[in-house]
Image (cartoon, helix red, strand yellow):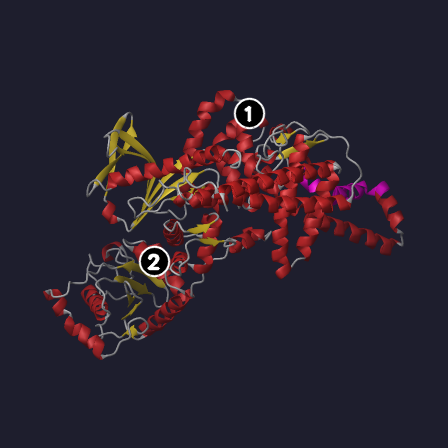
Amino acid sequence: MSEEERKQSEERSRIEMERLSSHLKDLILQLPPRELLGYIWSTTAVAGMLADGDARAHHRAELNTVQFVLEYVHAVLASFPPGGEGGFKEETVAEIFEVAEKIRTTTMSFCLFRAIGADGGMFGERTGLMLQSVLSNWVLMRGNRYGGLEEEFYRFVLEPHDQILREAYGIGASEVAAGIQAAVNSLAGGHANAADRMEALMEAAAKAEVEQGLTQKQVLEQWQCNQPEKLEAAKDVFLDMFQGGNCNLSRHTDLPAALLEDLAFERGSHHDFFAAGPLSGTPFRTLPARMRPLVKLKGEFFAADHAFFRDSSYRALLWNLLQRRPDYQKEFETRQKDMGELAFQSVLAKQLDGATVYREIWYRHPDTGHWVENDLLVRIDDALLLVEAKSGAAATVASPATDFDRHSRSIHDLIVKAYDQCRRFLQYLASADEVPIFKRESGRYVEVDRIRLADFRLVLPIGLTVESFSPYASLAKLFPDGGPIFGRHPFLSLSIDDLFVLRRFLPTAGELLHYLEVRQAVAGIPEAILFDEMDHLGAYLTKNRFDWTLRAQLNENTQLIYWDGQSEPVDNYFADGEFAEKLPPMQDYPEEGKQLLDALGATKENGWLSVASHIRNFGEESRNSFSDMLAQVRTSLSQQVSRYFQIGDDPPLFVWLQRTGYVPDMNMLRAKARAAAIMAGHSCTLTVLAYVTPSGTYSRVAPVPVDIPAKGTREYDALQGEVSRMNARKYSMPSEALEREREIPGARMPGANDPCWCGSGKKYKNCHRA
C-alpha cells in the first residue's frame, strides 16, 4: 500500500466513524435514559445466566460491545440536555448495538491505517507497533481491574487523605472505599440480587394465596393495608431490574451527595466529546466517563458502566478534593509521595517478612558525585529489588489518536524516569566491589549498610505507579531507552492495582520472587507481547516458565508473538461472587515437594531462594519425579538415619535427608554432593539438607554451599574413587536415589556448641539443652 492509499483509507475510516457515531448519538437520545440502562443491564444479566460452555465464551465477547454501548450512553447523557425522548422501543436498542459494533469494526481499520504510517516516531522502528496496540486497546480495553478488590485498593490509596476527606465530605477513607465497593457490587450483581428479591416476594404472595385462600389482587390489597414495606420492596425490585436502578448510586451506596456530585456530569454539561472537528463523537475522543464516571438524572446519580467508575473515580475524586481545598496541595503531594514509596512493602508485607528494607536511601551519583536518592531497596536472600514509585498517569485521559506524541511521551517519561533512577543506582553498585548506602538524618548522611552487587543472583529494577496504564506498562520493553539495564536486568513496570492481585495469588516470598524472576525474563523479550500484568500472571499460573515457551516459539522463525486471553484463570477467579472465601488458582505442586518448599521458605537460610527457584522451574513431569523421590527416600528414614539423591540438570539438585536426633556428617554430605555432580558431568551443584521428624514432616530445610573442585586438581582427583563407586553401582542421576555408602553410627549427644539434633539450626546449648 502506498502512502497516498494509506492516507485515503485512513480518511475514509475517519469519516465513517464520525457518521456512525453521530447516528448512534441520535438513537440514544430517542430513548428514556433509565429504561435504556435498565434494558441493557437486564438483558445482559439474563444472557449471562443462560450462558454455559461454549456459549459463555461468546457471552464474554458480547460484554465488550455492551460496555462500549454503555460508555456511549454516558457520553450522550453528559453531552446533551434532556428533551425529545420518546417511548422505549426494543428495536431502537437493537439498532444501537448494531451501529456500535460497526463503529468498533471501523475503528480497528482506522487503527491499522494510522499505525502503518507511524514508523520513525519516538519509539523508533517500533512506533507503528506501539501505536497500533495503544489505539486498539484505547477502544477495546478498559483495563483489567477486578471489582472485588476495590475496597482494598481505595482504602489503601485514600488513607493518607483521611482527615481532609472527612472535612470535605463528612466521611473518611474507609467509608469512601466501602461506598465505592458497594457501587461496584450493585453494578456487577444488582440484577441477580433483584431477581432473588423478586423470587422471595413471589413466594410470599403464593404462600398467602394458598394459606388464606386469597386471589393475587387480594394479596396486594392486604399488603397495601398491613405490609406496605412489601409493596415498597416490589417497587425497588422493579426499579433495579427495569429502570436502571442497579446503576443508581444514590440508592445503593451511602456516599454523600457532595462526593457523588464531584464525580458526576449534569445533563449536557460536557462539551468536548461531540464538539465539531476531526474524530468528533468517535471512540478516539476522550470519553467523558474518563473524567467523571457518573451522570445526574433527575437529582440522582447514575453510573452507566462499572469499569470506568472504578478506573476514573480515584483521579476524579482527588482532583475535586483539591478544587475544594487548594490549600491542601503541598501536603497532598507529600502524602501521595509517601504512600507510593511505602506501597510495595506495605501491600506485600507478608511476602517480604524477614527481608531487609531501606526506604529513601542516599548515595553519591556515580557520574556527578552529587547526593541522589532512591525510593526503596529490598534485600531478600540473594535477590535485590529496587523500587521507584511514581504517582502520575494523567496522560491516560488524553486520547492517543488526537495527540499520540503527548499522550505517549507523558507515560513514557513516567516509566523512563523510574527506569533511569534504577539504572543510576545499579551503575553505582557496579562502580566498586562494595558500596555504602546512606540515610539522611538532620541534614547529615549516615551510612547504614554496604552492598555488593556480586552477592545477588536476581536483581529486579521496578517502577511502581498508583494507577495501571496498560498496555504501556507491559510494553515498556519496546522503548528504545528502556532495554535491560547493563544488558542483564530487564525493567518491570507495575501498579499498586497489580500488587493487590499478586498478593492474593502469590502468598509466599518464594512464589512471589519466582514469578517476578519469570516476569523479568519475559520483559527481556521485546518480540513477545502480552497486554497487561494479569495476562503475565495467568500465563505463569498455567505454563510456569512461559518465557521458555515464548523463546521456543520465536525460534520457530516467528518474528513477533501476541498472546491474548492469558488472564483467564485470574478473571474466572474474580468472576466468582464468593472469591473472597476461596483460594485462588495456583500452580500445581505434588504435596511432598510443596512441603519441602514450605519448609525451605520457613527456614530462610542463605541461598534458599536459589534452591526454591530451581525447584519451581521444574515442569510437571520433573515435579512429580522429584516429589516421588522425596517421598521414597523420606519414608526409608525409619530404617536409616540419612539418605540422599540427585535430580535435574544445569545444575543438578542434591538432596540429603537427615532424621532428626542425629547430627549429619557434613564432610560426608559435601563429598557425596561433589562426587554426584562430577559423575553427572557438572562443575556446580545445588545442595540442600532436609531434617525429617519421626512423624515424617520437614522441620528444617537449608542450602549447603558445596564447591566442585576444578578438573585436574588434587581435590578433584581425590573424589574419583567415590565417583567410581557410584558409577559401579549404576546410580541413575536424574531419577533414582543414591544409596548411603555405609551405616551412620547410632545417635550421640551433640556438644554444647554443636548444631542441635532437632535440626533447628541453633546451637545445642541454646535449644534442647536449655
Amino acid of disc 1: Glu
Evaluate whether residue 301 shows in this view: no
Q: Do the residues under discs 1 and 2 have CB atoms within 8 angstroms?
A: no
Tag shown at residue 612: 2
Q: Quadrant of residue 187?
A: top right
Q: Position of residue 276 (x, y in %)?
A: 62, 29
From the viewer's side, name the closer residue of 609 and 541. Answer: 541
Would you say residue 230 is visible in this rendering? yes
- Measured along the vertical axis of the image, is residue 83 above or below residue 89? above
Q: Nearer the viewer, mark 1 or mark 2?
A: 2
Q: Is residue 627 a member of the stretch shown in magenta?
A: no
- What is the spatial separation of the Cα atoms under label 1 and label 2, in whole angstroms? 50 Å
**The stretch drawn in magenta includes residue 227:** yes
Task: Identify the disc placed on residue 167.
Answer: 1
Please report the bounds of the magenta region as a residue range.
224-249
Q: Nearer the viewer, residue 422 or 258?
A: 422
Q: Main secondary structure of the magenta part?
A: helix
| Of the pair 626 and 296, the residue shown nearer to us | 296
Q: Secondary structure at mark 1?
A: helix
> Is 298 displayed left or right of 218 in the figure?
left
Identity, as a three-letter code, of the amino acid under mark 2? Ala
Circle 2 crowding by C-alpha within 10 Å: few under 14, some 14–19, many from 20: many
